[in-house]
Image (tube, rainbow, N blue to C red):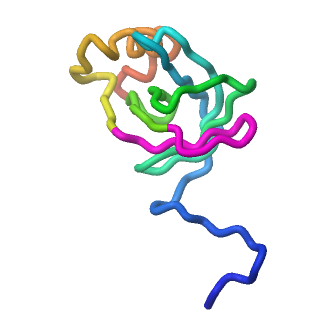
Amino acid sequence: MPLPPGLPFDRRSEPRSPSAAAARVWYGAGYEIWADGRLRDVSTGGARIELPTAHALPTRLALVHELAPTIFEAVVRWRRGNAVGLSFEARHALSGDIGPRLQHIRDTWLALYPAAHSPSQG
């Protein structure tokens, strides 16, 4: 059954889970520029983040959020005000070999959220 005219529809290829987790994006040569925001929803293929101010983001950036001990290399797909839609291109576990290019991101994130690298206790 077709959707009634004027109603929005979801064009995502994967369902997303809502979130309010802290997130940080890094960009620029050597990932020296960063902006803190909130993860608003996430799927295996992408995310929607919200930044508190209108940062001039490049097309490609790196994202880390509280829900996964992972650096996501992402492409900006859309932008509406402070909301940014991202598509993930690569994932790098914070506990794995990430190479020198992403080392600064891992070191900074683990200084902010040391529990992100610790094994869960239970």
Instruction: Decide: is 74 above or below 2.
Output: above
Query: Residue 84 placed where, x, y %?
Result: 62, 39
Picture quarter containing residue 95?
Answer: top left
Q: Residue at x 34, y 16 (%)?
A: 102
Quick check: is 83 in the magenta stretch? yes
Residue, far right: 6
Q: Residue at x 56, y 15 (%)?
A: 34
Residue, far bottom: 1
Q: Is residue 118 left or right of residue 84?
A: left
Q: Looking at the picture, tell me which residue is in the foreground, 121 or 87.
A: 87
Query: Residue 45 placed where, x, y %?
Result: 42, 49
Question: Mostly what secondary structure, the magenta segment?
Answer: strand
Query: Residue 14 placed where, x, y %?
Result: 46, 60
Instruction: Decide: is 43 above or below 5.
Output: above
Locate the C terminus by quadrant: top left
Please report the bounds of the magenta region as a residue range. Answer: 76-89
Q: Looking at the picture, tell me which residue is in the foreground, 100 or 54.
A: 54
